[in-house]
Amino acid sequence: MKNVKASLCLVFLIGSILSFIPAKSASAAPLFQMPFPCNQTWTGQTRTNHSPANSVDLNRTNDFGDTVVASAAGTAVTVRNLGNTSYGKYVVIDHGGGWKTYYAHLSAFSVNQGESVKKGEKIGEVGSTGNSTGSHLHYEQRYNGNDVQIKWNGSTIHYWGSKSYSSNNCSSKSGAPGTVNTNGADLNVRSGPGTGYSVAGQVADGESVTISCQTHGQTITGTYGTTDIWDKIGPGQYVSDAYIYTGSDGLVAPLCSN
């Protein structure tokens, strides 16, 4: 009987400890933009019988062959042609943190599998391949494999029905802009993505930087929360994204190749 009581006490103790451990929060999404060049206007249609339900079909007059661009920076993990079925020619971009975007029914590809892409970079052209009855772009946002309601520029699109949208996907070819925010102190620049790397200089609070690419490294808690993203701001120069304002908690530039 004593052993039974001891076992029950142990189970109760473990359950009490676990109840105080906070659940892991969902990874913040990148600041996704429309999958079309800056200032273009497209009509998006959502419907309850769509597959998957939270996807959107986008079209405009004479849109066959129009440019499709990346909604956010990431890596093209799928560039595939399913022929006359399903998505037809489609691209999947991995943005890190469990977030992916899908671009389907393309007429042509402009990116290779495994290639890093910037926000606003061309990845393909609108078409009508696969299970499609007319030219349009089928677009999805997924988190950990599940389709979620789509957000562009931080706002959820219209569900259910049709609405016109104007693209704010206005990227700079020179890199993604950021601003240092340390609440006063200079920020150490490291030679790699972690505080174990040597100091390669400093940037002042409030200074503007250009992020050429981003990588995952040491987890840091700073002005903008906790993250393992590090921003490359020059050759052999990295700063923690926890201290850089970019307008997004996720990736805003392509993943560094090394």
Image (cartoon, helix red, strand yellow):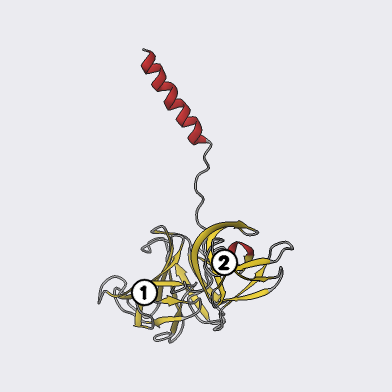
Residue 94 placement (x, y as % from top left):
42, 67
Q: Which residue is mark 1?
A: 114
| Drawn side of residue 158 relative to residue 186, left or right | left
User: In this orientation, which residue lies closer to the viewer: 249 or 101?
Assistant: 249
Farthest front residue? 198
Q: Which residue is mark 2?
A: 198
In the rendered image, the quadrant that contains the C terminus is bottom left
- From the image, state whether disc 1 or disc 2 is nearer to you: 2
Question: Relative to 113, does residue 50 appear above or below in the rendering?
Answer: above
| Count of picture labels | 2
Give me the residue at 55% from left, 81% from top.
Answer: 38
Neighbours of disc 2 within 10 Å: few (<14), some (14-19), many (20+): few
* Residue type highlighted by circle 2: Ser
Res. 190 visible in picture: yes
Question: Relative to 86, does residue 63 appear above or below in the rendering?
Answer: below
Residue 58 placement (x, y as % from top left):
44, 75
User: In this orientation, which residue lies closer to the viewer: 143 or 55?
Assistant: 143
Give me the residue at 53% from left, 42% from top.
Answer: 22
